[in-house]
Image (cartoon, helix red, strand yellow):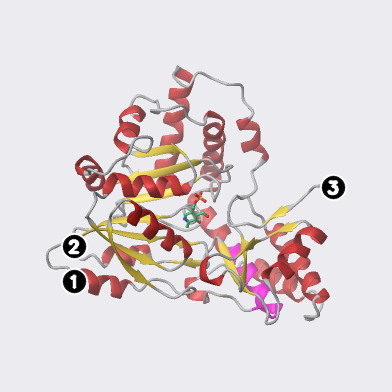
């Protein structure tokens, strides 16, 4: 049996052959000159995709490690944070911060909706004494397929000193996030998303104000001590043994992003999103997030009445080798998710939609033949990425 699969997950995403080859390079001394060159090149590339001149650090961990590092390095026990949550990863940020004894105030929005920057502005306006030290928020909420308006949330501070900490793990490179221009204090990313690298690396970009907070912070940290990471990075090293192969992969992936250009990557992701959404609607499926806040990385699809997510996910995999993701959080039993970020092309999407039509047809949900593919193709032909 052939083991070829079409990975339509919101991470890990497919790995381009160029990246896989780069990762197969012979081992090097991680305290030697080859590694210094590698880390410096990767750091330059990361500053490019974060659109920042600030210090960027790379950690050997999945994205959650970087979320934990952000909390543990910025917030001391008893500090107050405003967690703006629109789904399961917002809830994870709350859990991490509480574990580190941060006084978390939750501002939650229903699954499928984006955060309201006006509500953030109103809350900060009431915080006359500047008690809130940080705002924790997702750029792209992967559990619901919603893209938050980070620029508006940043502007909602209107002079309030709270640091803006943004989890852009599934957003960066797929959607614009000019960290310096939008005054994001901490931006957090992960290798297995639009970077097209296997899981295992996370990256953080910190503003000068954020570094000052790190220097003041009394919370405990050892492996995830960002001051140690910054100090070593200045010498082209890491405090502990780095995942050298993944860094080789990341170097190559950053070259690929530079070749496509960031703007080109945003356009491709927007086009894939629009193709997926048009195709799904033509198949008669309902989407969790409205068009206005739809994620360029992932689309959450409501499972038709009377079915379970596995009724769709399992035959897609077993019959067609098309891999989509289950739901998370409170919509776990009512949605499935189609990822369209990273090394994903229009033909992956067209094949995925064709397979989905077949699965729905077998479940007795009939549409016009080829309706999903036709609608997606029309979007592609018209280049109608909005
Ligand atoms: C928005 C967001 N935050 C955090 C995470 C957690 O990252 P990881 O699974 O790499 O620890 C993910 C992973 O899917 C994510 O999409």
Residue name at image x 75 percent, y 52 percent: 5
Residue 197: x %, y % from top left: 57, 42
Residue 142: x %, y % from top left: 51, 61
What is the C-alpha distance between the residues marked 2 and 3? 57 Å
Beta carbon of the mark 2 residue lies under 8 A of ligand 1: no
Q: Rate crowding at label 3 as few (under 14), some (14 to 19) or many (20 or more) other CA atoms within 10 Å.
A: few
Q: Rate crowding at label 2 as few (under 14), some (14 to 19) or many (20 or more) other CA atoms within 10 Å.
A: some
Residue on which disc 2 sits: 160
Residue on which disc 3 sits: 2
Q: Earlier in the sequence, mark 1 or mark 3?
A: 3
Residue on which disc 1 sits: 125
Q: Are marks 1 and 2 in contact (CB under 8 Å)?
A: yes
Magenta residues: mostly which secondary structure?
helix
Residue name at image x 47 percent, y 64 percent: 88
**Residue at the extreme right:** 1
Name the secondary structure under disc 2.
loop
358 sits left or right of 138 in the view:
right
| Residue numbers of the magenta segment | 271-285
Name the secondary structure under disc 1.
helix
Residue 187: x %, y % from top left: 37, 50
Asked if residue 30 is positioned above or below residue 223 in the image, the reply reads above
- Front residue of this view, candidates 120 and 87: 87
Q: Earlier in the sequence, mark 1 or mark 2?
A: 1
Beta carbon of the mark 1 residue lies under 8 A of ligand 1: no
């Amino acid at each position: 049996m052939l083991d070829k699969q079409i990975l339509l997950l919101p991470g890990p995403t497919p790995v381009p052959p160029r990246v896989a080859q780069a990762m197969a390079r012979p081992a090097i001394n991680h305290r030697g000159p080859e590694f210094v060159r590698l880390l410096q090149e990767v750091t330059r590339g990361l500053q490019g995709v974060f659109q920042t001149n600030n210090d960027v650090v790379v950690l050997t961990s999945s994205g959650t490690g970087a979320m934990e590092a952000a909390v543990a390095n910025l917030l001391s026990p008893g500090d107050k944070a405003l967690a703006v949550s629109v789904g399961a990863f917002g809830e994870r940020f709350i859990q991490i911060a509480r574990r580190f004894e941060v006084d978390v105030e939750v501002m939650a929005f229903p699954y499928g909706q984006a955060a309201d920057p006006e509500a953030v502005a109103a809350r900060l306006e009431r915080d006359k004494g500047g008690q809130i030290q940080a705002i924790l928020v997702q750029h792209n909420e992967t559990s619901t397929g919603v893209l938050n308006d980070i620029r508006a949330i940043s502007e909602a501070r209107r002079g309030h000193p709270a640091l803006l900490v943004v989890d852009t793990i599934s957003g960066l490179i797929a959607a614009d996030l000019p960290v310096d221009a939008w005054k994001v204090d901490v931006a957090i990313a992960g290798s297995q998303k639009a970077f097209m690298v296997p899981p295992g690396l996370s990256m953080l970009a910190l503003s000068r104000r954020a570094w000052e907070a790190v220097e003041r912070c009394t919370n405990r940290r050892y492996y995830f001590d960002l001051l140690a990471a910054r100090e070593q990075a200045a010498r082209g090293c890491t405090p502990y043994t780095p995942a050298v192969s993944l860094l080789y992969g990341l170097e190559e992936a950053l070259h690929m992003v530079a070749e496509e250009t960031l703007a080109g990557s945003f356009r491709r992701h927007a086009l894939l999103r629009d193709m997926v959404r048009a195709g799904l609607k033509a198949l008669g499926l309902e989407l969790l997030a409205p068009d206005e806040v739809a994620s360029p990385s992932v689309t959450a699809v409501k499972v038709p009445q009377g079915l379970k997510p596995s009724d769709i996910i399992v035959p897609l995999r077993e019959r067609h080798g098309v891999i989509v993701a289950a739901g998370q959080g409170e919509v776990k039993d009512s949605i499935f998710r189609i990822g369209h970020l990273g090394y994903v092309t229009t033909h992956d999407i067209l094949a995925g939609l064709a397979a989905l039509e077949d699965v729905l047809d077998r479940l007795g949900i009939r549409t016009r033949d080829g309706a999903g593919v036709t609608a997606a193709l029309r979007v592609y032909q018209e280049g109608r990425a909005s």
